């Protein structure tokens, strides 16, 4: 029996991804190709890394339903050894990856693929940016559930921040304002050695316990 999708390993700086798919019959396999990852998800990996803590180290396996256009239309977490919160962050971000769709008799078709990601090192901000510690400016209430604010940071190629937007409020205005104020001061050195590819947009979530 020949699988519909040949295993493909893509090495990222902090993650190893492996694609797999549901098996097909030998008769149809010769005329069938499998979804192939064409966008290596660098931006989404960096967004995920921005919220990762030491206790989030581990792996996440996701199953994607890939459309004939190569976009993920549905995803689910198969298993994870990270925290549940972080696994859902991974699912949300990596579901935006793009694929070359599977083909059957030459035509693009919808098909499932599995992505396995390992997180084993310490995360870095997008563009190797350095940002102020928000917790030194404002602290969350000492009691109650964890609160978080989701931000979108837009960088300029000069190394400065163009804008910071609140995508999801913490419901604590003082924390939202402190996060925005701090992340407007992020900066990276565009002339530094071994600088990664420029990332214009960075989605990050700050959590307070």
Image (spheres, rainbow, N blue to C red):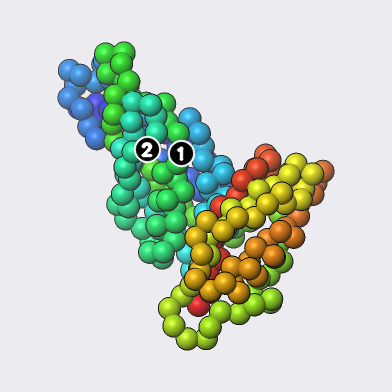
The earlier-in-sequence mark between 2 and 1 is 2
Relative image position of residue 95 (x, y in whole percent): 41, 44
Where is 164 relative to 33, above or below? below
Q: In which quarter of the view is residue 102 placed?
A: top left
Label 2 residue SS: strand
Please give the name of the residue rendered at 42% of the width and 31% of the height, measured from the top-left corner: 99
Q: Secondary structure at mark 1?
A: loop
Q: In the rendered image, which residue does mark 2 sit on?
A: 72
Q: Residues within 10 Å of mark 2 (few under 14, many from 20)?
A: many
Determine whether 153 is above or below 27 in the image. Answer: below
The single residue placed furthest to the bottom in the displayed view is: 143
In the image: residue 206, left or right of residue 67: right
Numbered circle sitting on residue 97: 1
In this rendering, the answer to whether 83 lies above or below 68 is: below
Q: Is residue 53 visible?
A: no
Q: Residue furthest right?
A: 191
Left or right, 88 with reference to 104: right
Residue at 24%, 26% in the rendered image: 2
Residue 166: percent from left, percent from top: 56, 58
Q: Are marks 2 and 1 in contact (CB under 8 Å)?
A: yes
Q: How many marks?
A: 2
Q: Residue 196 at what x, y percent from top left?
A: 68, 43
**Label 1, residues with CA under 10 Å away: few <14, some 14-19, many ≥20:** some
């Amino acid at each position: 029996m020949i699988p519909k999708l040949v295993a493909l390993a893509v090495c990222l700086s902090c993650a190893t991804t492996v694609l797999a798919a549901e098996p097909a019959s030998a008769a149809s396999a010769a005329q069938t190709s499998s979804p192939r990852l064409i966008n290596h998800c660098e931006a989404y990996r960096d967004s995920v890394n921005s919220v990762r803590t030491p206790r989030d180290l581990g792996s996440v396996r996701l199953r994607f339903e890939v459309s004939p256009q190569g976009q993920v239309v549905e995803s689910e977490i198969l298993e994870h050894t990270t925290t549940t919160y972080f696994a859902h962050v991974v699912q949300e971000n990596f579901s935006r990856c793009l694929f070359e769709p599977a083909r059957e008799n030459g035509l693009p078709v919808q098909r499932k693929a599995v992505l396995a990601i390992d997180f084993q090192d310490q995360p870095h901000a997008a563009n190797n940016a350095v940002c102020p510690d928000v917790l030194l400016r404002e602290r969350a209430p000492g009691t109650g559930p964890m609160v978080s604010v989701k931000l979108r940071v837009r960088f300029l190629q000069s190394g400065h921040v163009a804008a910071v937007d609140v995508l999801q409020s913490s419901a604590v205005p003082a924390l939202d304002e402190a996060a925005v104020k701090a992340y407007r001061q992020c900066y990276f050195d565009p002339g530094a050695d071994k600088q990664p590819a420029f990332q214009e947009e960075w989605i990050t979530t700050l959590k307070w316990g």
